[in-house]
Image: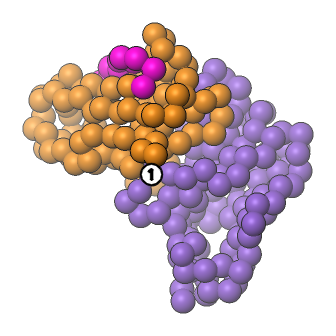
Amino acid sequence: NAGVTQTPKFQVLKTGQSMTLQCAQDMNHNSMYWYRQDPGMGLRLIYYSASEGTTDKGEVPNGYNVSRLNKREFSLRLESAAPSQTSVYFCASSPDSNVLTFGAGSRLTVL
Amino acid sequence: SQQGEEDPQALSIQEGENATMNCSYKTSINNLQWYRQNSGRGLVHLILIRSNEREKHSGRLRVTLDTSKKSSSLLITASRAADTASYFCATDAGAGNMLTFGGGTRLMVKP
């Protein structure tokens, strides 16, 4: 029972490079989310997808794009990474937009 | 901006003692949730309390909600070293699918 799987777990990028964080869930959940976690800031919502085919901006969407590829997968793309995007990124899913199940996180460092 | 603010930011207690952490929020909510995060891991859902509920129990956890004061508390009774983690409150204000997290309380339980 994998739950929510994120890849990669760790990534180091140079400023201006691009990359995609992958997320997949096997619980048949409708809603999926991307959060970033910075020290002392809690989690801030970047983008979410209420259902397959829809995406919406969260609190801090600038510099990111997302794709809800199908019901299982929700990817987060950084087109031109900046040091301010150094963070731990968490993907989560929910059957009903209430209780979230989180992945283990992806630690990204932008030099 | 964060909807929920936890207090204290850090708490250190001895095994067997009770731990109380508080969460204050700014706007009306549909429900409030508490999550736990072990170091280097994703968040795990602990308990959800709806706006029309005042108290809820789950094992050694007791959550209260005071909507007039816009605050909630999480009590962990008879704490164990394994309870060492960060605890976050999250509020569902009904604004689409956005669950908003506070900055967390870091709990250390000394054996």
Q: Residue at x 52, y 67 (%)?
A: B85
- Relative height, residue A105 to residue B13 (above, below): above
Q: Residue at x 65, y 54 (%)?
A: B46
Q: How is the image coloured?
A: by chain
Q: Circle 1 marks a residue in which chain?
A: B
Pick whichever, B99 or B1, lies toward us. Answer: B99
Residue A31 x %, y %: 54, 25
Residue B25 x %, y %: 70, 44
Where is the C terminus of chain B found, in terms of image quarters? Answer: bottom right
Tell me the magenta residue range.
Answer: A62-72
Tell me which amino acid carries mark 1. Gly
Q: Which residue is mark 1?
A: B42
Q: In the shown orientation, is residue A18 left or right of residue B57?
A: left
Q: Residue at x 73, y 46 (%)?
A: B48
Residue that lies at the very extreme toward the top in this rendered image? A53
State the image quarter where residue B107 is shown.
bottom right
Residue A68 x %, y %: 39, 18
- Relative height, residue A28 to residue B64 (above, below): above
Q: In the shown orientation, is residue A48 left or right of residue A66?
A: right
Chain that appears orange: A
State the image quarter where residue A20 is shown.
top left
Q: Is residue B93 visible?
A: yes
Where is the N terminus of chain B found, in terms of image quarters? Answer: top right
Chain that appears purple: B
Label 1 secondary element: loop
